Image (cartoon, grey):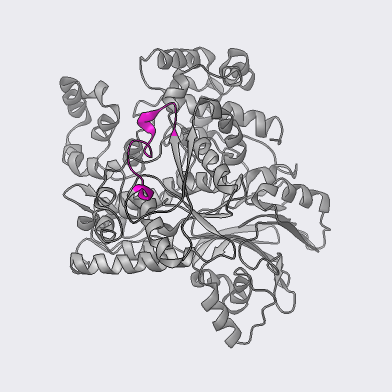
């Protein structure tokens, strides 16, 4: 696990400015405090920060091939590197290290960009081909590891694991992307390839970028797919239970590969409990776990109000409990620096506290992220099944039905799902997330200047539903597809990566192994949600490994108590960012409307916490990244 950065000039003879390259690399020291490495050649420079996990002695980067014509820097882990290495050695390749990443160099020699189809793991890498004068950037299939790029006015391409690394080069204009505001107030996060910067882009999951002589091309090498509704294997439930159980064991075993000790995060739910339970079968050492609780908001605390796995007979292992409270609000500010793009959530702050505690003992933890996307565990799958038949009615009729029953005010989220459009597209999915409702609060709170920017440049979403077979899938799987293409990469694993790497901690996500994901696409929706019980087949497969209470426990999920925080006594620096002078100075939002929203929220006249968190995050983001580039 590392941080990577660099740049390639359109002129192959232009020398590399090592001052810029060092600045870009040094600002990500938190991603790799164990060492650094550089490559500088005609037209290209690569920088690397190392977190030593595999091959502690000889795993430094950049890595090169036998004749030195290729230079690689990679962030991530290749879990099938042992078998790939054996095959490559048999084919005559010579390895200089025991690093898992070195297999990429030799695979590229044999297969070119098709080397990506051979890799199993989480990765983002940059490979410089000196013979072709070509840069090859790639991101793993599910977007677990991040990589960003930008093209300067002179045609130079800058890339890095984090946006701040590109900004510190001082070669990229810091123009704000108005379209990203529309994402923030629609989904609660920004959809790739956009960032809040107009000129910095994220490489989407399952894509690669080629840059040669000043020209950029982007291509997709992997996509999620499901069987057509009428073309599915007719295997029994028992067959699927056994098949899934064996794959889960294999995946957890692979993710435990490490030359340093491995810990785990543990909540009260089945996802992390399953990971920890399976880990115990592959080590003689007790698995050390870490759990997060909330002192000030007990209704958010799932590890105090219910027994975690370590409290059940036969599951005796150490568990450290970390409690988040109002005094930890500084993690929110620090979280913006590391997370970079704002969101409507404060989850990064809570995760950072957990990461800080974990990093005091470990460099690697396994987590349960991804299971809800892979098995369809979120509440909107159930609500969609129940309310979907009403979607054919005119929206005015559905709204009247809600008003007559009083549901509109009592249950705003379920009302949002009830009013969602019939077509299973991004608009309907946005209503599932329930971030702001159909009456978009952005129209009122965003300043006229930025509202006009959006009107002049409407957000033309890259369609996530353009896959040829999309219309032939079950509704359940259409939601899974949209989640994988948007919220999973742009919010879930993005936040996990930034929160953990802030403390030089590698978080591994076994549920996002692409072979497991592809296996789960074949499981019928009727087994993923049976009798409205979410993740049924997963629960059934783990029934022999977990206590029944955990196996069939209702999902709660991690959520930061934003609403409670914003109703409590706010720290002075938070009041500062909400103040009228600061709002006017930055110019993104209308101060009277922000004041009205904050007052109404604090007086209990509505829950505007998500909109307020976006406003607060953008205000802080502006200080950190527009006014300067410093923590």
Span of residues in magenta: 294-311
Q: Is residue 499 visible?
A: no
Q: Is residue 313 visible?
A: yes
In the figure, is residue 163 to the left or right of 367? right
Q: Quadrant of residue 404?
A: top left
Residue 492 position (above or below residue 593): below
The residue lying at 31 percent from left, 65 percent from top is 245
State which quarter of the image contains the C terminus.
top right
Give the x, y percent position of residue 279.
Answer: 42, 61
Give the x, y percent position of residue 145.
Answer: 54, 54
Give the x, y percent position of residue 587.
Answer: 60, 21
The residue lying at 60 percent from left, 73 percent from top is 103
Residue 604 position (above or below residue 55): above
Q: Nearer the viewer, residue 256 or 487?
A: 256
In the figure, is residue 108 to the left or right of 254? right
Is 310 colored magenta in this rendering? yes
Q: Nearer the viewer, residue 452 or 515?
A: 515
Q: Quadrant of residue 227?
A: bottom left
The residue lying at 56 percent from left, 41 percent from top is 195
State which quarter of the image contains the N terminus.
bottom right
Residue 303 position (above or below residue 250): above
The residue lying at 77 percent from left, 52 percent from top is 21
Tag count:
0
């Amino acid at each position: 696990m590392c941080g990577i950065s660099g740049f390639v000039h359109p002129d192959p003879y232009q020398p590399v400015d090592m001052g810029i390259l060092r600045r870009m690399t040094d600002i990500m020291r938190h991603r790799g405090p164990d060492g650094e490495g550089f490559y500088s050649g005609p037209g290209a420079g690569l920088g690397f920060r190392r977190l030593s996990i595999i091959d502690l002695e000889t795993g430094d980067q950049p890595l090169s091939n036998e004749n030195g014509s290729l230079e690689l820097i990679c962030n991530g882990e290749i879990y099938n590197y042992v078998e790939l290495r054996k095959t490559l050695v048999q084919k005559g390749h010579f390895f200089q290290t025991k690093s898992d990443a070195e297999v990429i160099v030799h695979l590229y020699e044999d297969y070119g960009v098709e080397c990506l189809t051979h890799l199993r793991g989480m990765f983002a890498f940059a490979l410089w081909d000196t013979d072709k004068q070509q840069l090859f950037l790639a991101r793993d299939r599910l977007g677990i590891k991040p990589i960003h790029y930008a093209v300067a006015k002179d045609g130079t391409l800058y890339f890095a694991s984090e946006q701040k690394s590109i900004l510190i080069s001082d070669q990229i204009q810091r123009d704000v992307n108005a379209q990203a505001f529309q994402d923030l107030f629609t989904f609660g996060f920004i959809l790739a390839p956009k960032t809040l910067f107009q000129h910095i882009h994220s490489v989407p999951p399952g894509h690669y970028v080629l840059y040669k002589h000043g020209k950029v091309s982007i291509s997709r090498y992997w996509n999620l797919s499901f069987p057509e509704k009428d073309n599915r294997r007719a295997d029994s439930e028992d067959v699927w239970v056994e098949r899934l159980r064996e794959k889960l064991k294999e995946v957890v075993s692979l993710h435990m590969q490490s030359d340093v000790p491995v810990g785990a995060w543990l909540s009260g739910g089945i996802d992390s409990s399953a990971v920890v339970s399976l880990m115990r079968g592959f080590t003689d050492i007790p698995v050390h776990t870490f759990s997060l609780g909330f002192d000030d908001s007990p209704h958010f605390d799932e590890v105090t109000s219910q027994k975690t796995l370590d409290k059940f007979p036969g599951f005796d292992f150490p568990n450290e409990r970390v409690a988040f409270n109002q005094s930890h609000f500084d993690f929110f500010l620090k979280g913006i620096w590391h997370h970079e793009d704002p969101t409507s959530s404060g989850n990064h702050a809570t995760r950072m506290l957990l990461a800080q505690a974990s990093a005091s003992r470990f460099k690697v933890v396994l987590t349960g992220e991804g299971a809800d996307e892979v098995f369809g565990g979120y509440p909107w799958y159930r609500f969609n099944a129940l309310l979907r038949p009403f979607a054919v009615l005119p929206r005015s009729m559905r709204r009247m039905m809600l008003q007559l029953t009083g549901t509109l005010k009592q249950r705003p989220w379920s009302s949002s799902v009830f009013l969602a459009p019939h077509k299973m597209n991004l608009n309907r999915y946005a209503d599932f997330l329930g971030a702001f409702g159909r009456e978009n609060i952005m129209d009122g709170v965003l300043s006229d200047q930025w509202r006009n920017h959006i009107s002049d440049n409407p957000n033309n979403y890259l369609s996530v539903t353009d896959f040829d077979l999309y219309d032939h899938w079950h509704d359940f799987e259409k939601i899974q597809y949209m989640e994988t293409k948007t919220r999973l990469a742009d919010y879930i694993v993005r936040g996990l990566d930034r929160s953990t790497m802030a403390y030089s901690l590698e978080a591994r996500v076994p549920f996002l192994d692409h072979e497991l994901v592809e296996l789960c696409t074949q499981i019928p929706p009727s087994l993923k949600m049976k009798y409205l019980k979410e993740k049924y087949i997963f629960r059934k497969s783990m029934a022999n490994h977990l206590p029944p209470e955990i196996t069939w426990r209702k999902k709660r999920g991690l959520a930061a108590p934003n609403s409670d925080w914003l109703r409590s006594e706010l720290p002075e620096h938070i009041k500062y960012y909400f103040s009228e002078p600061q709002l006017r100075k930055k110019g993104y939002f209308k101060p009277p409307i922000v004041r009205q929203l904050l007052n109404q929220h604090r007086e209990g006249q509505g829950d505007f916490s998500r909109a307020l968190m976006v406003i607060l995050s953008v205000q802080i983001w502006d200080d950190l990244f527009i006014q300067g580039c410093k923590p």
